[in-house]
Image (cartoon, grey):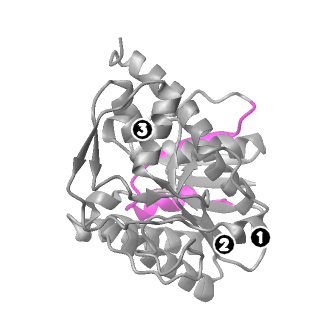
């Protein structure tokens, strides 16, 4: 199968790419200009690395040409900063996605998988665990834009026959997280703990989230590219809630040392508890998470320590 991955060189995208290569798929990875491949690919791995502008109709049309499936993993914003400039969020994510869909339609590409946000599209939970039928009331522009993209994907499926699958992924963590941009609670906490720096916690540490190892995310994408069932939206989650205080305790266990925390006033956009159920993905895709939180953190800590050593940030 020929698969185009928009954002295939990033933290999540590279894990998905490596997993798809294990199944001998042919990949075309689309990244921003001047982004180099995340590793050297073997001669037996069929990978075409292309760069371009997601807002360019020409670049995107060339990228999707001849594809069986498009994986859309690109986001230009983060949940915590998206409210600062909602216009930018919409222009660079929603509008760019519509241009991608138009290019797919023109090129005759009839399948797309979109990574949505299990952490933000639902908003405050009415019940737990949150399933795919739960109301969607996002509190941040990031989640609103993700939800709008979902709706347009389903509209294009209805109007143009482009089959859309949407994976609402909870808080992913793992190797290749960007240390310098403080991406995700696990990545931020681990990076600071490894450097013997204090961790800032907004609120009293009881904010609870659903953390998922990136290898399990990649397995879900490996399943969805072969899925021919009728369901469109899936929660991809661990199904377990972990508070920030519990996360700190787990990291302390893995690293074998105490961590100092600074507790700061809570933020209004932080939903107190968000835990997603994954029974639909288990039933329809035959997927379920296999890596326990502590094991995933241990793998991530080993990788991150090596990166910090390379960057001379650890003694």
Residue 284: numbered disc: 1
Residue 110: numbered disc: 2
**Magenta-span inclusion, residue 49:** yes
Could you tell me which secondary element the residue under label 2 belongs to? loop
| Residue at x 40%, y 80% (from the top left corner) | 137
The percent position of residue 32, horizontal first and vertical second, equals: 40, 46
Quadrant of the rendering where the N terminus is positioned: bottom right
Please indicate whether residue 77 sits to the left or right of residue 219 in the image. Answer: left
Q: Distance between the residues labelled 2 and 1?
A: 21 Å
Q: Nearer the viewer, mark 2 or mark 1?
A: 1
Instruction: Using the image as rendered, state which of residue 306 and residue 42 is in the foreground.
Output: 306
Q: Mark 3 — residue?
A: 35
Instruction: Using the image as rendered, state which of residue 73 and residue 97 is in the foreground.
Output: 73
Residue 6: numbered disc: none
Please indicate whether residue 286 sits to the left or right of residue 167 in the image. Answer: right
Q: How far apart are marks 2 and 3 (CA)?
A: 28 Å
| Residue at x 51%, y 31% (from the top left corner) | 253
**Image height check: is 66 above or below 22?**
below
């Amino acid at each position: 199968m020929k698969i185009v991955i928009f954002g295939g060189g990033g933290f999540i995208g590279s894990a998905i790419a490596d997993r798809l290569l294990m199944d001998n798929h042919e990949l075309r990875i689309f990244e921003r200009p001047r982004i180099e491949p995340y590793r050297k690919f073997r001669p037996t791995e069929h990978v075409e690395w292309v760069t371009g502008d997601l807002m360019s109709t020409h670049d995107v049309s060339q990228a999707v040409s001849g594809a069986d499936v498009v994986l859309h993993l690109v986001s230009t914003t983060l949940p915590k900063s998206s409210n600062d400039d909602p216009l930018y969020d919409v222009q660079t994510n929603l509008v760019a996605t519509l241009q991608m869909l138009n290019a797919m339609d023109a090129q005759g590409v009839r399948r797309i998988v979109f990574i949505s946000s299990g952490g933000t599209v639902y908003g405050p939970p009415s019940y737990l665990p949150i399933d795919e039928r739960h109301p969607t009331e996002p509190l941040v522009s990031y989640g609103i834009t993700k939800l709008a993209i979902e709706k347009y994907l389903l509209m294009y499926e209805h109007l143009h026959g482009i089959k859309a699958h949407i994976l609402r992924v909870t808080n992913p963590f793992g190797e290749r997280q960007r240390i310098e941009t403080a991406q995700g609670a696990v990545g931020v906490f681990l990076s600071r703990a490894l450097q013997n720096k204090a961790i800032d916690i907004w609120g009293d540490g009881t904010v609870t989230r659903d953390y998922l190892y990136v290898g399990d995310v990649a397995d879900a994408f490996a399943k969805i590219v072969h899925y021919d069932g009728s369901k469109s939206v899936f929660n991809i989650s661990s199904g377990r809630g972990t508070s920030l205080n519990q996360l700190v305790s787990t990291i302390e266990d893995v690293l074998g040392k105490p961590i100092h925390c600074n507790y700061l006033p809570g933020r209004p956009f932080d939903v107190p508890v968000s835990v997603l159920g994954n029974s639909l993905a288990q039933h329809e895709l035959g997927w379920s998470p296999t890596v326990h939180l502590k094991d995933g953190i241990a793998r991530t800590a080993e990788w991150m320590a090596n990166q910090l050593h390379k960057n001379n940030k650890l003694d």
